[in-house]
Amino acid sequence: MDILQFYTLIEYCRNKRTFIQTHNIPDPDAIGSAYGLKRLFRHYGLKATICYDGEIDRISAAKMMDMFGIEMFSNRDLKDTMTRDDCIICIDTQKKAGNITDLNGSEIAVIDHHPEVDYTLTYNYLYKDIQKVGACCSIIASYFKELEIDPGSDTATALLHGIKMDTLQFTRGVTKTDIEMFAYLHDYADQDKLNGLESSGIIFNDLKTYSAAINNIHVFDYLGISYIPFPCPDSLVSMVADFIMSLKEIEVAVVYNVRPDGLKFSVRSERRDVDAGVLISAALSGLGSGGGHAAMAGGRIKSQRLAELGPFREHFINDRFMKMLGISNRRNLKQSLLPSSNINIEVKDIIP
């Protein structure tokens, strides 16, 4: 953290309307980061409004907002009132990163833990802090620590929850900073509230999504690819990708969701030689867009481009990812199962 530069940001925002914008469809890490930064601004006597585009579609995200009284305003609420004179701080995302809507304000700062996009390399932000850590909440927690500001119980709990969610309980993309911030926040956090946030991560209707993913999975060497043939929330696609990664045979997971507006991809990797962000970007090159971390990434193909995948969409996508990974073995674990062992799980088989 560049403290002098941060103080410059604070003073610049003092007489302006300031918005803290998360990536579209914000998850707990984005919400916790924005909430923490807003509380930090309040310490310096500044007001800030948290905003986003899309929907709040993860149960834990909605529960988090209710528990701490976090106010967030959608683009629908603000599009008629924001002006170019308003300040925007991008958090857990970057302008033109592919997962953020360009709102009618001026982006003056970015705080993020995703790889730096080309636009950010050339754009002259007043304040820029992009760190390679497991969660953006870890960056905001470090601000409280370095500035010697007491975060308070709610802020600490929200930040800690964001760190745990984005690192998948400290099993994905964890860095020394994430561990240090966990230790720092632990003494401030309300453990009862934290436990409440981490319970009931899915609802009954989510089971059909898991069922579809299981029935449609194919495994080629260490690569597992599955698809969900009906629309579902982005957060659920990500959760299914994490679930697929729990299979012993899989080291790289690709899950895509079929929607009216195209295909939504979620990618996971636990191999050091496979960067999930690079993989999805390469696999969708010329068809869509994608990017993210070494361990997890996402992407999209818009409906207008789906005809280019041909009549056998599933095979096209499988071949595309296999080619990117240099996997030539066409042996499919699902196809190699004996007929009597075919996977065919329905929700009714899971619930008595």
Image (tube, rainbow, N blue to C red):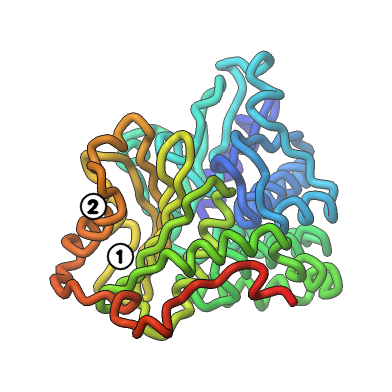
User: What residue would you read off at disc 1?
Assistant: 275
Q: Residues within 10 Å of mark 2 (few under 14, many from 20)?
A: some
Q: CA distance from mark 2 to mark 1?
A: 21 Å
Name the one closer to the observer, 56 or 189.
56
Residue at 71 percent of width and 24 percent of height: 77
Question: Of the residues under marks 2 and 1, which one precedes in the sequence?
Answer: 1
Residue at 37 percent of width and 78 percent of height: 250
Task: Judge whether 21 appears above or below 176 on screen.
Answer: above
Of helix, strand and loop, which one carries label 2?
A: helix
Task: Judge whether 216 appears above or below 96 on screen.
Answer: below
Of helix, strand and loop, which one carries label 1?
A: loop
Q: Residues within 10 Å of mark 1 (few under 14, many from 20)?
A: many
Can residue 16 be seen in this snapshot?
no
Q: Quadrant of residue 120?
A: top left
Q: Quadrant of residue 221?
A: bottom left
User: What residue would you read off at disc 2?
Assistant: 316
Which residue type does callout 2 highlight?
Answer: Phe
Return the x and y of residue 97 as percentages of the image width and height: 41, 40
Residue at 53 percent of width and 49 percent of height: 92
* Number of marks in picture: 2
Residue at 27 percent of width and 75 percent of height: 332
Return the x and y of residue 2 as percentages of the image width and height: 51, 52
Look at discs 2 and 1 and give the one toward the viewer: 2
Return the x and y of residue 84 as percentages of the image width and height: 56, 16
